[in-house]
Image (tube, rainbow, N blue to C red):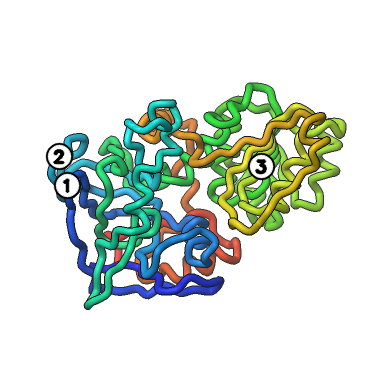
Amino acid sequence: MRGAVLHTAGGDAKLDLRDDLSLAGPDAGEVRIRIRAAGVCHSDVSAMAGILPTSVPAVIGHEAAGEVVEVGEGVTTVAPGDHVLISFVPACRHCPDCLGGQPYLCMSGIGDAFAKAPFRYGETDVFRMAGCGAWAEETVVPETAAIKVDPDVPFDLAAMMSCGITTGVGAALNTAKVEPGSSVVVIGAGGVGLAVVQGAKIAGAATIVAVDPLEAKHETAVRFGATHVTTPDGLAALQAELTAGRGFDYAFEAVGRSATLTAAWDATRRGGDVVLVGAGAVDDQWQVDMFSLLFLGKNVLSSMYGTADIERDTRRWTDLWRRGRLDLDGVISDRIRFEDLNDAVDALRTGTALRQVVMFDEG
């Protein structure tokens, strides 16, 4: 089968686009999925760069949807023929995090995500990025990572709910719980940042500012619900104009860098919420003085995977999409062939692409 393999992580790493991969399994408790659509997410690029850890060699990709083709012993929640999306945080439903209402923190799949290598070519074993390995024609994941999707949802739109939509919309609705009439600023207007914008609009925010250095993204941000757009250099003036200098009720950082988290902190009013959505590097340290941390009363919130319950929220996103309140199709800037993956990664690195989706049935 075809699959995109990363051999060595680095800033300009290229994918080895192979057609000779084999795949073992499914073992007990696992599901084999034919991938029909897979998103090209910035986290994939971060894994290729070595910012996010992954065992190598690995099939990259973690945002995807497809069809169940085989199930292992003991699997009861899905069956061959079911349409599913893949969750890179499978929730076991038994650990303290899951039982405490935080399934997005479940660590049940972390061991296999780094240690299990079900792909193979020649004598070389190949791992799966984030336990998914979605940039391949088929993959094997734990049963808990295969989330059923209604068959009327196209595979490319279902793939958007696998990561980007859940992370971004979830940050607004689940993590921050944005209130109607409030003011919001979103720093970073990539795929996840625009999903935050959509979530803020759904929540009824009165003011939604999207911030991105690439002005080409500003028109798209307005289409998704931003009431104002600016480059980073213009944020302070816009903040003064819209909030009388007080700051926004909610500031979302959707880039994954300490510098942009500082910008989000500075843009937030006293007592407001600073929401970290972007995934950054372990050596990128963020600092704030202890006096300000206490007396400004700002809340710094981590939004891991949109603090989602992926099974519940997949149903929520599907309902919002059906009612025309959540735009899934508009998030996709390009539908590409497997052979175009290296070009797609380059486009994401330069910021010229929104959400590209590999359609495995094409090409």
Q: CA distance from mark 1 to mark 3?
A: 43 Å
Q: Nearer the viewer, residue 127 or 20?
A: 127
| Amino acid on which the number 3 mark rests in the picture | Val
Q: Position of residue 251 (x, y in %)?
A: 69, 37
| Amino acid on which the number 1 mark rests in the picture | Ala
- Disc 1 designates what residue? 28
Residue for point 41% across, 34% down: 103
| Amino acid on which the number 2 mark rests in the picture | Gly
Q: Nearer the viewer, residue 199 or 45?
A: 45
Q: Are marks 1 and 2 in contact (CB under 8 Å)?
A: yes
Q: Position of residue 318 (x, y in %)?
A: 38, 33
Left or right for 136, reference 62: left
Q: Position of residue 67 (x, y in %)?
A: 23, 48
Name the quadrant of the N terminus: bottom left
In the rendered structure, which disc, 1 or 2, sits on the residue that comes first in sequence? 1
Task: Find residue 330 and name its label.
Answer: none
Q: Give SS at disc 1.
A: loop
Q: Quadrant of residue 123?
A: bottom left
Left or right for 295, reference 192: right
One can see residue 322 in this view: no
Label 2 packing within 10 angstroms: few (<14), some (14-19), many (20+): few
Left or right for 354, reference 90: right
Establish if 94 lies above or below 10: above
